[in-house]
Amino acid sequence: MRAQTFGPITMANVYITKRYSLYCSHLIMACDNPNEKTKETSFHGHSMDLLVTFKNSIHVESGLSLDRDFADKVIQDKIIRKYDRRNLNNILEIPTGENLIQSIHNDLQSTDLNSIYFQCQLKETNKNTFSSEVNKTP
């Protein structure tokens, strides 16, 4: 049995997710008792995976939906340099994973990748992954 063809390659929207590494530290104050020391309220760091998803059609000549070198350069210049190996308390007023993913999301929307940027996820620990998705209305 032969594979079916579904029309011109340029009609298909595809998603591609790129993975980047971030190493950050932070101190979060306890919500109910700021003097109580816990795992979360002690100064600590995380080795995190940042997953950035793009949505685009496939380019006819290259067969690709994303200039990966360009995306890597933009992410490196605008995201990794800003957050990697940093104390997040010096960047965010409240340095939680929720606020970090929202800040990264906002940064991505202000780049040249905005037209194809779809979603970002931040895996902070094996138990906590934060997501932020673009809400583009037609």
Image (spheres, helix red, strand yellow):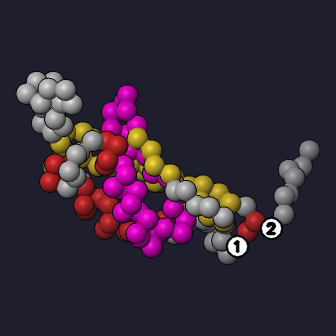
Residue 24 location (% of width, % of height): 22, 46
Q: Is residue 113 above or below residue 1?
A: below
Three-letter residue code for mark 2? Pro
In the rendered image, residue 20 lying in the magenta stretch gets the answer no
Q: CA distance from mark 2 to mark 1?
A: 9 Å
**Do the residues under discs 2 and 1 have CB atoms within 8 angstroms?**
yes
Which mark is drawn over residue 60? 1
What is the secondary structure assignment of the residue under circle 2?
Answer: loop
What is the secondary structure assignment of the residue under circle 1?
Answer: loop
- Residue found 31% across the figure and 49% down from its top: 100
Q: Which residues are magenta?
A: 101-129
Report the label total: 2
Residue 18 location (% of width, % of height): 47, 54
Left or right of residue 98, residue 67 in this image? right
Q: Is residue 137 above or below residue 124?
A: below
Q: Earlier in the sequence, mark 2 or mark 1?
A: 2
Residue 135 location (% of width, % of height): 55, 56
Residue 70 visible in image: no
Residue 42 location (% of width, % of height): 12, 31
Q: Is residue 102 above or below residue 38?
A: below
| Residue 31 image-quadrant placement | top left
| Residue 34 image-quadrant placement | top left
- Residue found 14% across the figure and 26% down from its top: 33
Q: Which quadrant does the C terminus fall into?
A: bottom right
Q: Which residue is mark 2?
A: 8
